[in-house]
Amino acid sequence: MKSVDYYRWRVKNHLGKWFTTRHEASEEQIRKEHPEAVRIDHTKVTRQIPETTAEMNQRMYMRPFEGAQQPEHPVGPTLLRFPFWANPTVLDERPLTLPTEAYSVQNQEGGRSIVKVRATGEVVFDGAGPAQVIDNPYPPF
């Protein structure tokens, strides 16, 4: 992994007026378009950039790197699948922490689905359906 520092910058637009960028850029990136750019030091963000295929695969599958904090919500043994609100032909997924059998799915008329924990009756999903609760096909960390 290589560490790269990113900053926000003060640059001139095509009219010669100074403005602050809305995104961070490395010095190498910003100098290509704006050689006059002035770095804003207190906006520094350091990112770890993968250099090898193994590091890239590790990053793509969201596996934590050595010394990294574990995610707050690790991928569970079960997934909730439901239609994405903006395009119902695309499925969205949400990890669930209990086994598949612990959930009940009620697909109602009008396309609404309610997913509850069987033991407690807690509603974990109430939205556009049809929803499914399935075993997680993705590899664990």
Image (tube, rainbow, N blue to C red):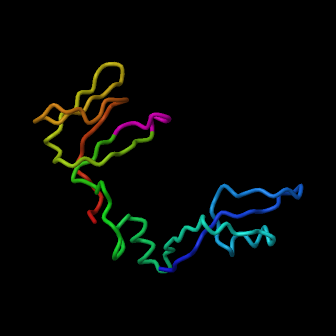
**Start and end of the magenta stretch?**
82-89
* Left or right: 108, with 19 as reference point: left
Residue 86 on the magenta span: yes
In the depicted view, which residue is nearer to us: 51 or 13? 13
Residue 68: image x %, image y %?
35, 71
On screen, 138 above or below 26?
above
Toward the left, the furthest residue is 119
In the depicted view, which residue is nearer to us: 132 or 46? 46
In the depicted view, which residue is nearer to us: 73 or 16? 16
Toward the right, the furthest residue is 15
Residue 105: image x %, image y %?
22, 32
Residue at x 44%, y 41% (from the top left corner): 90
Residue at x 24%, y 53% (from the top left corner): 76
Q: Quadrant of the C terminus?
A: bottom left
Residue at x 66%, y 55% (from the top left corner): 22
* Left or right: 62, with 108 as reference point: right
Where residue 5 sits, quadrant-wise, is bottom right
Residue 130: image x %, image y %?
32, 31
